[in-house]
Image (cartoon, rainbow, N blue to C red):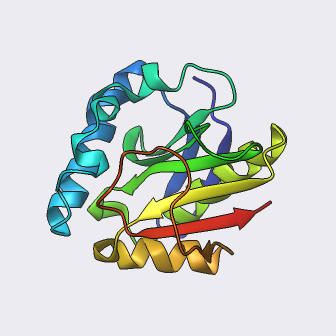
Amino acid sequence: MKAINRIELKEFSVEIREIEFQDNERIAKILRETLLEHGAAKPGTAYFDESTDHLFEHFQKPKCAYFVASVNDQVAGGVGIYPTEGLPSGICELVKMYIDKDFRGFGIGKLLLTEAVKFAKSINYSAIYLESMPELDKAVSIYTHMGFKSLNAPLGNTGHFSCPIWMLLEI
């Protein structure tokens, strides 16, 4: 698949592209390893979502996309924009944003998040909702830095009852 964006960092070149079928296993592994690493592999999280093992297929719907960051042809992480059931009109969800531990701290999360926001704007979403956990505090700080604001209650029907952090970005 053609790269959507290629960024040269000091350390290496990062290619941002849409997910391909062969990325499913690697992205699922990154997601689950990250949640295990942070003590957050519990029911009510993406760790147990059926879609985690089939992200390519899950994102073959209108108004959604899953972006993968690749470094030297190795998948380093990903993020999705999804029209989650039950969200208010014009709001999508930022889903399954995870970066392999060997690639954290280089700005790849910010690159993926920027691409996701750009996509959401391009298809006329007015806001992006996300859910997270205190165990993923570094990700939450990135979201805050990118302009997401905390909410007092969840939106939509995500099924992630173990995610007590809810945030929204007006775009």
| For residue 84, side relative to residue 23 (left or right) | right
Q: Is residue 108 visible?
A: no
Residue 53 sits above or below residue 81 on the image:
above
Count of number-bearing discs: 0
Q: Is residue 111 visible?
A: yes
Residue depicted at x 57% and y 54%:
112
Q: In front here: 30 or 71?
A: 30
Q: Is residue 4 left or right of residue 143?
A: right
Q: Quadrant of residue 135?
A: bottom left
- Residue 12 at x, y = what percent? 48, 59
Q: Quadrant of the N terminus?
A: top right
Q: Residue at x 35, y 69 (%)?
A: 133
Picture layout, residue 169 above or below residue 91? below
Q: On the image, which quarter does residue 146 sit in?
A: bottom right
The percent coordinates of residue 106 (x first, y second) are: 47, 70
- Whole-percent x and y of residue 45? 28, 52
Image point (69%, 30%), residue name: 63
Question: Nearest the camera: 82 or 71?
Answer: 82
Q: Quadrant of the C terminus?
A: bottom right
The image shows residue 136 at horizontal and vertical percentages of 34, 72
Q: Left of 19 or right of it: where is 76?
A: left
Q: Residue at x 17, y 56 (%)?
A: 41
**Observer-nearest of 100 and 15:** 100
